[in-house]
Image (tube, rainbow, N blue to C red):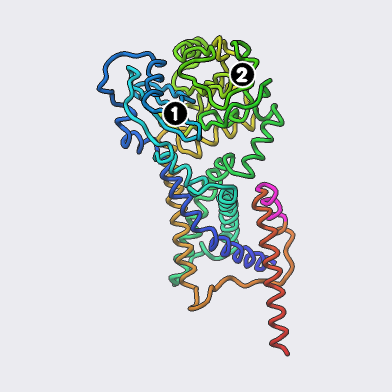
Amino acid sequence: MEKTNYTRFWRWHFYAALFITPLLITLTLSGIGYLFYTNVENNWYKNEFFNQSSQTEQLTIDQGMEKAKQTFKDYSVSKVIVLEDPYNTRLTMTNKDGDQKYVFLDSNYQIVGSQNPKYTFSNVMREVHSSLFVGGTVVNYLVELAACWAIFLLLSGIYMTFKGRALKKEPNPSKRQKNLKWHALIGTIITIPMVIIIFTGLPWSALMGDFIYSAAQKYPSIGTPALKQNPPTSDISEIPWATRKNEPPASTGGSHAEHNGMAAMDHTSNPSGMIAVQQLMNEVKQADISKPYSIIYPKNEQGVYTVSKSSNTGVTGLDVSPYDEVTAYFDQYSGKLISKVGFEDYGILAKWFTWGIPLHEGHLFGWLNKVLNLVVCLLFLLVIFWGFRTWLTRKKKNSLSAPPNLSSKLSVGFIIFMLLLGCMMPLFGISLILAVLIEIILSFKKKFQNMNIAK
């Protein structure tokens, strides 16, 4: 039975690797790129991030925002990112079509430069890593599926390593045995860290990510605290993962608070009695929220200012320690702090992923985190390389040379293992059903061919 299990794991390991290897290479390389996005952007965007404008007149932040609106017609400010020195302040401006523009203000709140968000290094790496820069539900599921099968590859590889002869010393090892040994040895070393990296990235995935977040919201004792809130303002990446889909409470003041919200508010000209951003920043300071933080504008006249510090923003200079995370809601008319949620208020599930996501992104504990993630990713690419070489050394000409398809019954251990993985990763479970159906079809095809040969 052990030999049967080994061959079956080998066959599924082979086909899984054959189909998802291109995706795994893409995800690993883009992950390495994203790992160092802050270092790249600090050099590529020195002018926008750190330089001063030739205009030296001191403006208030509100005057700087008004000037940005006049410079970029049809755009209004939807978000302000207030960073620590020496970084410049960054505005996110949005037009009626939903197009965005990043505008940078220096210490005098004069315009330094602007960017198209679609093509910044961090956003390109993130889009490739999460959706292959194509996007769409199907692609998002495909990326998640590749991550799930990568876990199967690692765990099945561990089984075959210790049940087979990969690490056993051979007197005169062949080229294939040498490649297999390196493939198995490095795969064994990186299995635990690689599984951790994959699992800490799953909160952003399409199916499992939504499941995790729904569980965190449904059970506040283990997830995120329940707040009495109105409909959500926006799904903004700068809001911490644990609270990004929370519904912010409504502002109570203002002459237009009782009216239905507009599609886009003219934030800079302050038509509806909204407090100035400088006044809001004073209120933020009074609430003991230090830089860096982002200010997300209300989307309608009943909305609130959302001020957040997050450990997983994807914005250079904005990430903080998970323990410093905070999401605060301020009345847009009075500036009064309505509610505030911090890391200490999260349940164990939300705390785990708030801690795990920056570990996945490589900035939980500084450069050491980056280096460790980089080493694991590079070794993973080597595992793929040696696996490919191992296959080539056994591959026959004009043949796929796949491991044999066994007709014997499945062992209880194999079934339990696959069921556990299928329950832990629902998308993997769904794909597993399809894989089993394909195996059954191939088995019937083989029997039919044997019957014809016998005749």
Is residue 171 visible in the rendered structure shown here?
no
The amino acid type found where label 2 is placed reads Gln
Compared with residue 36, is residue 322 higher up or lower down, i.e. above or below? above
Q: Position of residue 269 (x, y in %)?
A: 46, 17
Q: Is residue 201 left or right of residue 172?
A: right
Tag of residue 227: none
Q: How many marks?
A: 2
Q: Position of residue 368 (x, y in %)?
A: 42, 37
Tag of residue 74: 1
Q: Does residue 418 belong to the magenta stretch?
A: yes
The amino acid type found where label 1 is placed reads Asp
Q: Position of residue 174 (x, y in %)?
A: 45, 72
Compared with residue 313, is residue 455 higher up or lower down, i.e. above or below? below
| 262 or 135, nearer to the observer | 262
Residue at 55%, 45% (x, y): give it: 198
Q: Is residue 54 left or right of residue 361?
A: left
Q: Which span is picked out in magenta? A: 416-425
Compared with residue 300, is residue 377 higher up or lower down, i.e. above or below? below
Q: Is residue 197 left or right of residue 212?
A: left
Q: Residue furthest left?
A: 54
* Label 1 – label 2 distance at C-alpha: 23 Å
Q: Does residue 307 belong to the magenta stretch?
A: no
Residue 244 sits in quarter: top right
Q: Quadrant of the C terminus?
A: bottom right
Label 2 sits on a secondary structure element that is loop
Q: Quadrant of the N terminus?
A: bottom right
Q: Is the residue marked by circle 1 packed among few (<14), some (14-19), or many (20+) residues within 10 Å?
A: few
